[in-house]
Amino acid sequence: MPHIVIHLSGQPDPQLTRKVVDTVAELTQSVLDKQLPVIATTVQYIAAESWFIGGRSLAELGKSAFHLDISITDETNTKAEKARYLRAVFDAMAALRGNLHEVSYVHLIDARAAAYGYGGRTQEFRHQQAGA
């Protein structure tokens, strides 16, 4: 169900990648109640010299940053759950990354069930089949 795209500042680091993926997956399960077998995650690194906040690069600022987009099926999580997730992800990333810039974003994308899915089936189809 959830598709997660994570951008991290800096140079590729396989150990950090694994820690971030594991941490985000755990939070996605525990806070948003999503199932691990259908959590798909991609991670990309962007050089600090190429990531700008307020017109200054992270290299200039001596900071790190991240951006996380997660697509979830609309109406499957409350506003309170989403707010808890946003805070938990930010806090976890701050613990994993040194000098994390506050302007690091988490974007929960509520996708319509009829326009989102995996394996060639929409989430709406899965919902209807589950209720049958």
Image (cartoon, rainbow, N blue to C red):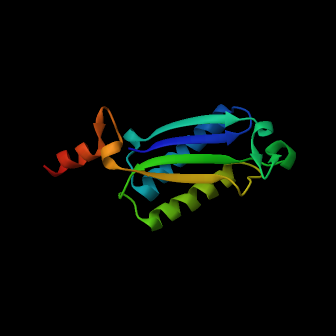
Q: Would you place residue 112 above or below residue 38 in this image?
A: below
Report x, y in % for residue 130: 19, 48
Decide if residue 43 is on the left or right side of residue 82. Answer: right
Front residue of 30/38: it is 38
Q: Residue drawn 30% across and 45% down?
A: 114
Q: Would you place residue 95 above or below residue 21 in this image?
A: below
Q: Residue drawn 38% across and 40% down?
A: 38
Q: Residue furthest right?
A: 60
Q: Would you place residue 56 above or below residue 119 in this image?
A: below
**What is the number of callouts on the image?**
0
Report x, y in % for residue 26: 49, 49
Report x, y in % for residue 125: 23, 43
Front residue of 84/104: it is 104
Q: Residue drawn 45% across and 66% down?
A: 79
Front residue of 12/113: it is 113
Q: Residue drawn 36% across and 42% down?
A: 116
Q: Residue furthest bottom?
A: 80
Q: Which quadrant of the rendered structure holds the N terminus?
A: top left
Report x, y in % for residue 53: 76, 50
